[in-house]
């Protein structure tokens, strides 16, 4: 049986080497598309839509992402209908990132599916890890929030501005803080 590729390891959440040539080529393609997207103007909505269709793994109708926007690969991002992402959002999509319908992201929201090992020898060897992120429909993520690898945020929830979400958040709650914790049911 052949050894898995670095891409297969990455998407499976196993140790992988990000300097792999295939992964590097995928990131360069995404950088080119995000650069083009970030250089568009507010009058070029059709061009923005076309670039996002080429960049993302899936994009529902009526999504709006305000430039600048940054991601690692793009093809591992799946966005539902009617999603709005404000200025400066970052998605590190070394694993799949699923965003439901009608999600609102404030400025500078960061969604991370990539992480580094805690063992310094593993980090020094250039290895990385990943875990998918799932954000349910009708979620509002306040500006500057950070969503960490492996997190699921349930539908209808609100994440307060500046929160650091390190564990799952259930449906229909207001959660905030560092680490993000449930403040009340909605």
Image: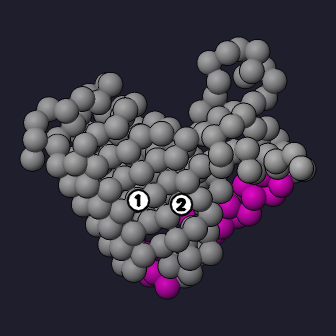
> Residue 36: within the magenta?
yes
Residue 17: in magenta span: no
* Left or right of residue 22: residue 100: left
Q: Classify residue 156 as left or right of residue 150.
A: left
Q: Secondary structure at mark 2?
A: strand
The label on residue 77 is 2
Q: Secondary structure at mark 1?
A: strand
The image shows residue 12 at horizontal and vertical percentages of: 65, 45
- Seen from the viewer's position, the closer of residues 142 and 76 is 76
Quick check: can you spot residue 55? Answer: yes
Q: Earlier in the sequence, mark 2 or mark 1?
A: 2
> Is there any visible trace of residue 35 in the rendered image?
no
Compute the Cα span from label 2 to label 1.
8 Å
**Most distant residue in the front direction:** 1
Q: Which corner quadrant of the image does residue 60 belong to?
A: bottom left
Query: x and y percent of residue 17 in the render?
Result: 79, 38
- Residue corresponding to mark 1: 99
Q: Is residue 49 left or right of residue 23?
A: left
Q: Which residues are magenta?
A: 22-46
In the displayed structure, 28 sits above or below 52; it is above
Mark 2 and mark 1 residues within 8 Å of each other at the beta carbon? yes
């Amino acid at each position: 049986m052949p050894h898995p590729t670095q891409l297969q390891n990455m998407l499976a959440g196993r140790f992988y080497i990000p300097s792999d040539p295939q992964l590097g080529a995928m990131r360069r393609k995404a950088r080119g598309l995000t650069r083009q997207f970030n250089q568009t103007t507010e009058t070029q909505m059709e061009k923005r839509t076309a670039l996002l269709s080429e960049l993302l793994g899936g994009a529902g109708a009526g999504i709006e992402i305000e430039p600048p926007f940054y991601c690692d690969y793009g093809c591992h991002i799946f966005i539902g209908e009617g999603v709005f992402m404000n200025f400066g959002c970052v998605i590190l999509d070394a694993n799949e990132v699923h965003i439901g319908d009608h999600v609102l992201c404030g400025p500078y929201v960061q969604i991370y599916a990539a992480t580094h090992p805690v063992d310094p020898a593993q980090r020094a060897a250039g290895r990385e890890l990943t875990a998918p992120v799932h954000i349910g429909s009708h979620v509002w993520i306040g500006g500057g929030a950070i969503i960490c690898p492996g997190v699921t945020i349930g539908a209808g929830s609100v994440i307060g501005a500046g929160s650091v979400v390190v564990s799952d958040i259930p449906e229909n709650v207001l959660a905030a803080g560092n680490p993000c914790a449930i403040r009340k049911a909605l």
